[in-house]
Image (cartoon, rainbow, N blue to C red):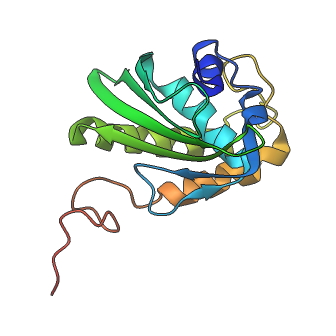
Amino acid sequence: MHPFRAAVESGEFDTIGRIFAQAVVLHSPIAHRPYHGRETVAAIIATVADMLADFRFEKEIGAPNAEDRALVFTAKVGDLDIEGCDFLHTGDDGLIDEITVMLRPLKAVTLFAERMSERMAMRLLPSDPSATDTGRGAPYPASDKTALKEVHDGLAGTGGVGSAGSGVGDRPE
């Protein structure tokens, strides 16, 4: 079992950053540019875990010691089923240095994008200014607010098909 799968399945989101390279890159299915850095990627993974229900890996593709692995998963966002695949690349040091996530179907992905943006905003501006809890009992250090702001800003304008900045449904003039 890949260490990423093991960490996700055991709910180790407060320490998941330890399996990422410092310069890890995450290619998001909903943001227009990749995210960089261990803290940023760990914040995204923890937020996704909080948001998705009934998450389970269905299949792991790739040889046990291969640099590249694919983890196929299913979950629920709201009352919609969502399917996806995490494509992972592991560097020579054994740490994940690249993650590419694919999601489907569009209706569930659109809801996912909306909720992800809302969750990141809530983490940036909690109703209780002293709050430092991720909802999983793990501390959420104030130093990670920069990572959250980067994620939230990257999600701005991902309002769905045909929305400004979505790139979907845009037509050349």
In the image, residue 120 above or below residue 138: below
The image shows a total of numbered marks equal to: 0
Using the image as rendered, state which of residue 103 and residue 80 is in the foreground.
Answer: 103
Residue most toward the bottom? 173
Residue 22 showing in the rendered view: yes
At x 73% / y 33%, what residue is drawn?
Answer: 19
| Residue 101, percent from left and from top | 44, 43
At x 16% / y 76%, what residue is drawn?
Answer: 171
- Using the rendered view, name the quadrant where residue 112 is placed: top left
> Which quadrant of the figure contains the C terminus?
bottom left
Using the image as rendered, state which of residue 39 and residue 123 is in the foreground.
Answer: 39
| Residue 20, percent from left and from top | 72, 40
At x 73% / y 45%, what residue is drawn?
Answer: 92
Residue 125 showing in the rendered view: no
> Which quadrant of the figure contains the N terminus?
top right
- Using the rendered view, name the quadrant where residue 166 is placed: bottom left
Using the image as rendered, state which of residue 62 and residue 169 is in the foreground.
Answer: 62
